[in-house]
Image (cartoon, coloured by chain):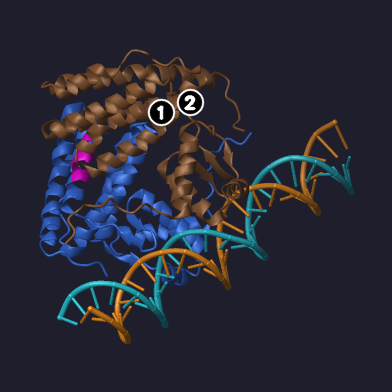
Chain colours: A brown, B blue, C orange, D cyan
Amino acid sequence: MVKTDFSPIADTTRRAEIVALLRRAILTGQLQPGQKLNELRISEQMRVSRAPLREAMRELVQEGILTSIPYAGTFVIDVTAKDIDDAYSLNQVLDEFAIERTWPQRDQRFFDELDRRHEAVKQATRNLDTTRQIETALQLHGLIYEWADNSVLLETWQRLTSRLQMYFALHQHARNEPVPAEDVHETYVQLMKGTDMRAAQRHAREHINLDFEQLLSYARSLEQRPSKGA
Amino acid sequence: MVKTDFSPIADTTRRAEIVALLRRAILTGQLQPGQKLNELRISEQMRVSRAPLREAMRELVQEGILTSIPYAGTFVIDVTAKDIDDAYSLNQVLDEFAIERTWPQRDQRFFDELDRRHEAVKQATRNLDTTRQIETALQLHGLIYEWADNSVLLETWQRLTSRLQMYFALHQHARNEPVPAEDVHETYVQLMKGTDMRAAQRHAREHINLDFEQLLSYARSLEQRPSKGA
DNA sequence: GACAATCAGATTGTCGACAATCTAACAAGA
DNA sequence: TCTTGTTAGATTGTCGACAATCTGATTGTC
């Protein structure tokens, strides 16, 4: 009897790879909000037929980062200030819940992983890699959702994450790289290691608040002169 | 200038209709948890090709009521007691949030709609139509989500709803129709019309609690002797 | 010039067929 | 008997072509 626990085999369908490619393109801002996705053109570029491409698009539509209008096309979602505000306020509630659920489950493995992800953020920050910085920061933040042991909550968070990453990437892209030099996550990590759950919850709420405020003002400024996508 | 506000044109793609058909079949328990969906057979029954069927399936996979394994098949999700518990506890948190957001926005139109949906539940109850009863009860409950004016929250609720409806349908199906005769929603409606928000939140939490407890014990009893799906 | 009808091009939706993969049954060898 | 290799059948994944629909330009009429 083999006792090693293997990781599951990677999805080797074209569809899965297309999903990953498209998602990355959207979340990094390569594909801009409102932009139309031409099926023929993309399928030729990727050297696949339209069938798996279309299936991949359906997935991303359900994931909430694409939107589809029958016989008109599939588009990258538009980002409005209201969307960001909605995502933000829901995120606050979910954070509080996730921390509450995670709290009693924290153990050494949790703390180690917390440090590991924190380190990844600092690494990306040192490298001035803004895209990766956003990605790692969200992963750090996502730890409490993975640890909360609630599959539905985790799914919800992952859906939210897609959008958040898109919003932040958009923002960074626009402001063109003034990367926050000092470590904004230090306090959060310390609190998550501590004994005062309420304090951790409060901090999560306020900390995230800060980031979002910047995002919001940026989004609002965009909406003054709305532009047609592509 | 025409001032009438028209409802959006119905989706006339096969895909959309297939999604609706499949969803209904799953949520009413026609397709049972764990059951495999044979693409060829279903496409022949529906008289459509596999392309739109597969696209529809991808949507439902992302919606969380189907699950797909490459080259193996697409299956109706399995319902475990843990899933129900997860959905339930998240639902509590979301309810509280939704009520808080809806509260200041309540107006006559809200109250009217509340009554309308409440009436629909009572109607279904009188008709002993358990499927419809579940559907209408969830719609009554969903009103606070529609009124909360938060698109992300609404989406999340709708995803949750799919599963909840499936769980409840499964339960009812198994217990074979002892429909609750008395009106369990009366208090809820009254509280939502009242002035004490905290009381409404508390009630929502406890009321839902009751329903779920039954579900949970049922699900646990199933898990004693797990059965292979189809 | 304004407006409606028509039409060509482009794009999305759907189809039927083929390729890749899995499953289960069977055979061969230790 | 157990394991391993093979094979046939069924099912999923992918492809290229056709049908349905939309868009914008053109034409014709008033």
The rendered magenta stretch, by its main secondary structure, is classed as: helix
- Residue ID for mark 2: A170
CA gap, disc 1 and disc 2: 13 Å
- B66 up-or-down from A219: above or below: below
Foreground pick, A10 / A105 = A10
Looking at the rendered structure, the kind of residue marked 2 is Leu
Q: Position of residue A126 (x, y in %)?
A: 38, 19
Based on the picture, tell me whether residue B88 belongs to the magenta stretch.
yes
Q: Position of residue B36 (x, y in %)?
A: 33, 66
Query: Of tags 1 and 2, which is closer to the observer?
Result: 1
Q: Position of residue A125 (x, y in %)?
A: 38, 20
Which residue is painted at 38% across and 15% down in the image? A180
Which residue is painted at 37% across and 13% down in the image? A181
Looking at the rendering, in which quadrant would you find the C terminus of chain A?
top right
Based on the picture, tell me whether residue B4 belongs to the magenta stretch.
no
Q: Is residue A17 left or right of residue A9?
A: right
Label 2 crowd bin: few (<14), some (14–19), many (20+), radius 10 Å: many
Q: Are marks 1 and 2 in contact (CB under 8 Å)?
A: no
Foreground pick, C30 / B200 = C30
Label 1 crowd bin: few (<14), some (14–19), many (20+), radius 10 Å: some
Q: Which residues are magenta?
A: B86-94
Please state the total of marks drawn on the protein image: 2
- Residue ID for mark 1: A132
- B55 up-or-down from B96: above or below: below
